Amino acid sequence: AQTVTQSQPEMSVQEAETVTLSCTYDTSESDYYLFWYKQPPSRQMILVIRQEAYKQQNATENRFSVNFQKAAKSFSLKISDSQLGDAAMYFCAYRSAVQTRDGNKLVFGAGTILRVKS
Amino acid sequence: NAGVTQTPKFQVLKTGQSMTLQCAQDMNHEYMSWYRQDPGMGLRLIHYSVGAGITDQGEVPNGYNVSRSTTEDFPLRLLSAAPSQTSVYFCASSGAGTSGGHYEQYFGPGTRLTVT
């Protein structure tokens, strides 16, 4: 079974600075997807960024980018120019790309609370 | 489109009571699932469905029942509520069941359930 580990329960960053959230995962599969989700106090789950394992290029979405190290099974999220609105719980998640009945299942890490200081 | 809707938003139950959490989506998605969110544990899959009439157990299915009689609806039933079921529950849907590829999962707003 796949597992996802987020070793940082909480992180803080000064507004306008850069912060990196860590995520490692364990899988025996070679084809999969990795995600970062943001959960603000409203509880809504918001997809921040997605990475396909077969792509070597790291995904980027505006101020959000990832460092995907497939051999090390590491998938960190970098937030540049942090804003007060970035304060939230961030979840790393894994999804198999294998075509099975549960192929859409997401496996989540425990989450990292990000606090942004003004 | 309303996306994924969940009712109620909040619920308090006494131990032993039963209830149904409602989930509906209007995007004609094949795949629907229920997760529970607990502090320090992220979201864990309870049950899922790849289409009407088909359901399967996830990681933590005990104490919960589901059915999928239509594409739109996927209710989650708590048969006899226990304090260990105090959690936030999320319903999610996406466009593919077994066809692979990537289809984004859309989450509902969540239901906060407290069992006393």
Image: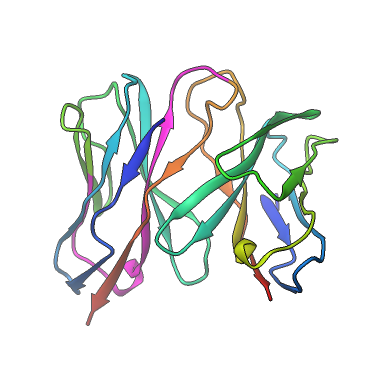
- Residue shown at 76%/45% (left/top)? B65
Residue A91 in magenta stretch:
yes
Res B25 visible: no
Q: How is the image coloured?
A: rainbow
The segment highlighted magenta reads A76-100
Q: Tell me: residue B11, above or below residue B60.
A: below
Residue A20 screen position, x and y as percent: 18, 56
Q: Identify the residue shown where x is 26% and y is 24%.
A: A55
Residue at position x 22%, y 51% in the image: A22
Which of the 4 image quadrants contains residue A16?
Answer: bottom left
Seen from the viewer's position, the closer of residues A94 and A14 is A94
B29 falls in the magenta region? no
Q: Is B102 above or below relative to B9?
A: above
Image quadrant assignment for residue B57: top right
Residue B89: percent from left, percent from top:
62, 58
In the rendered view, does B45 fall on the left or right side of B66?
left
B1 or A32, nearer to the observer: A32
Q: In which quadrant will I find the C terminus of chain B?
A: bottom right
